[in-house]
Amino acid sequence: MLGLGMQELVIILIIVIILFGASRLGQIGKGMGDAIRNFKKATNEPDSIDVTPKKDTADKKDSPEADKKA
């Protein structure tokens, strides 16, 4: 595991607690969990991009059919 032992992990955890405070660790963990969950969801979902052109109401006004009706 990249040569990190238990002592190194404990030291890193202590530094993180000092930098962010114990109260923010829960928020950081939740944010990381949500990010991982959303990433997994995005990679597992099929691409559902709608490439059909949308009809604009302004095009209908400028069309020759609109002139015939008027």
Image: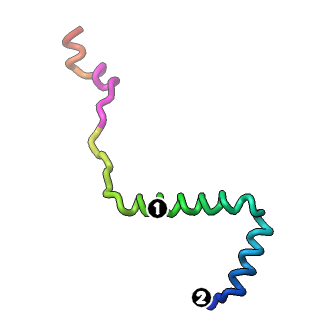
For badge 2, the amino acid type reads Leu
Query: Extreme bottom residue here?
Result: 3
Q: Residue 45: horizontal and vertical position, in percent?
A: 34, 58
Under tag 2, what secondary structure? loop
Residue pointed to by mark 2: 2
Residue beneath the point at 80% across and 69% down: 18
Extreme-right residue of the structure: 18
- The residue most toward the top is 70
Is residue 40 toward the left or the right of residue 48 in the image?
A: right
Label 2 or label 1, whichever comes before in sequence order: 2
Q: Position of residue 51 (x, y in %)?
A: 29, 46
Which residue is labeled 1 in the image? 39
Residue under the point 29% across and 31% down: 55
In the rendered image, residue 60 lying in the magenta stretch gets the answer yes
x then y, percent, for residue 70? 24, 8
Residue 31 falls in which quadrant of the image? bottom right
Task: Pick the quarter of the image with the N terminus.
Answer: bottom right
Q: Camera-side residue: 46 or 67? A: 46
Q: Residue at x 76, y 75 (%)?
A: 14
Q: Is residue 56 left or right of residue 12?
A: left
Q: Which residues are magenta?
A: 54-62
- Residue 51 sits inside the magenta stretch: no
Judge the density around disc 1: few (<14), some (14-19), many (≥20) Cα neighbours within 10 Å: few
